[in-house]
Amino acid sequence: MVEHRPGPQPPASLSSILSPPLHANPATRADHQQLLSITTRPAPIAILLPRSGSFPQEMDSRNQAPQKSSSFSSASSNKAREVDRNLSLGTLRHGDHDRRGAAATWEQIKEECEDEEEDGCGDPGVSELSGEIDAFIAGLDGQAPLSLPEATLEKFAAAVELRIAHTENSRDKWANGEPPVLAAIARISALASALAKNPEASSKYVSGAHRVTAVLQRAMAFLEDEFHALLEPKTETCKSIRRPPSFEQGGHEADRCVLRPPDTAPAAAEPKPPYTPETMERLRSIADIMVAAGYVTECTQMLLVARRNAFDASVRALGYEKSSIDDVVRMTWEALETEIVTWIKAFRHTINVGLSTEHDLCGRVFSGCHASVGRGVFADLARCIMLHMLDFTEAVAMTRRSAEKLFKVLDMYEAVRDSSPVIDAFLSASADDEPAAGNALADLKTEIASARSRIGESAASIFCELESSIRADAGKQPVPGGAVHPLTRYVMNYLKYTCEYNSTLEQVFREHRRNDAVDGEDNNPFAAQLMEVMELLQGNLEGKSRLYKDPALSSIFLMNNGRYMLQKIRGSPETNAMLGETWARKQSTNLRQYHKNYQRETWNRVLTLLRDDGVLTVKGHVQKTLLKERFKQFNSAMDDIQKTQGAWVVSDEQLQSELRVSIAAVVVPAYRSFLGRFAQTFSAGRQAEKYVKLSAEDLEGIIDELFDGNPSSMSRRRT
């Protein structure tokens, strides 16, 4: 049945139908504009109703906005959409005779469709006309004489449109391989392009050209729907979205992700492609037709949106949720530390797995003569994905600087630094033959360099905060017993872990060295910073040693802290390599000097009491009164040492043993000799016990119990 719209005016949407989308390529827009300019007089529109019967109201596919569907994957299309796909712009004719001819043509096509038994509506028409259309296109391209009836163009366009409608309602379009409709759409696209490029043909086939253009636009809307349906992930019964395999990752902890070191992490399984080979081939077939027809923007934008959504789902699966800068700045360190670990895991996965998978996908969908389109799509996608991740680095760099953040910030710096070679590889592959893609990747490389600079500057500032912390630690309360100061423990442990990042920190300080840093390629700026920290710590400890009233205890304090520093340096190959043997020898010299100072302040006075300097014996006679006083002084001195130095602490067992051995080696022989000369002066019994309270063995026992932090042990010995 054929219905006619009354009235002499053409439909208001004619110009919009005949005009290409604003984002089509310039050549296509020019071709369509040329076709539009040929129309000289409005004409009524012939509308073909679907085979199932008429509808309650007139509908024209020219005035219907295309709706997204999934007709390649599902046969459950709604009725309104079926009506829209079965109606299109009719042929434009001049006068009643032409309208009757158009109606007859439509009736012929319908009759041919109804005669088909196996292939479906419109198939024989397309097949029979394809040879003539191909010859006509070849003639137009070769400037051959034009000899095809205009009715053939209209009949071919109508047959293609009916095939599209039949394909939309098919349950499984790909059951027997690539559906014939794709070849039909590719042929009508080539026909429209050939007509637009040939002014003579455009003026001769005005009605046919408009009909071909209208069907082509409907065909492109149909392909957009199918392309979109193939790209979208299938919905599971539990309403969750199945993540594309290109971004999937194995099991991970839900509350806290811990990135394994590269040398201990198990080899990752080969990432699965985001789509099956069959789906990939279908995407490529559709993309080839759309790009050839000038619908590059529509095709690429659908792919970009779909893969960006897949990326968002992938990082959520890894536990990373993008936060605003304000949210990051307000986070507690515990929360931010967890967020950084998760970000690093997602970022490394994106660099090592995601980008390569997306690069392969774009290369497969847009291949052959359209490979440059694929490179451009990948460049835009990579830039979009990476900028999404790099925003977090800017937020972290804006947080308050504190020493505990250094190691996680350095982990971020390394992740960003390691991404540069990956981007460089993609850039070198695209820069020569695709300037646009190369420019996008070059912009991305600039953004990565900027993020690296921000994080590196933050790391350098955080390390310098350690120096500020040392300067600010000016406590007036000495550590009891001369033990290792908490500042010493903190700084040395901090430096031990810092030196595990020595190569990274060397890079950081080369890029962000201070004005007073030593220049020269052979000089390690991080080693210079490390040496400065050690000098600051040593100066701080010397100041704290002066808080002790007893000079001997000051020496014990410096010995304890100096020995702890030396052990930490020698126990860490990285730190020892950074500071070098020169510093270690200097520190050992300082320790020997502290030892001498301690012995001088404590035991030289005791040794003086055990010397016979000509006062105790006069002309061979012992001055008993002076001898008694000398024993009293010795006993009192040892009692003071027991009370005080028994509470002093030397936690390092080796240093403690060295001190005891060195004291005993000097004091015990001197006391034994003193006793040998003067002990018999006192009569046996109470007098001897009153003055000679300690034997040489008792003195050794006292010395062996020094520096254990327990003064009560001395009193127990006396009782």
Image (cartoon, rainbow, N blue to C red):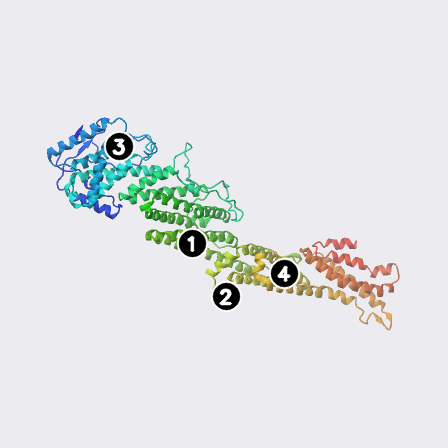
> In what element is the residue under mark 3?
helix
Mark 4 and mark 1 lie on one chain; the one further toward the N terminus is 1
Cβ atoms at labels 3 and 2 below 8 Å apart = no
Cβ atoms at labels 3 and 1 below 8 Å apart = no
Mark 1 and mark 2 lie on one chain; the one further toward the N terminus is 1
Residue type for callout 2? Val
Determine which residue is flagged by label 4: 562
Residue type for callout 1? Ala
Mark 3 and mark 2 lie on one chain; the one further toward the N terminus is 3
Determine which residue is flagged by label 3: 165
Question: Which mark is nearer the camera, 3 or 2?
Answer: 3
Determine which residue is flagged by label 2: 518
Mark 4 and mark 2 lie on one chain; the one further toward the N terminus is 2
Mark 4 and mark 3 lie on one chain; the one further toward the N terminus is 3
Determine which residue is flagged by label 1: 451
C-alpha gap between disc 4 and disc 3: 88 Å
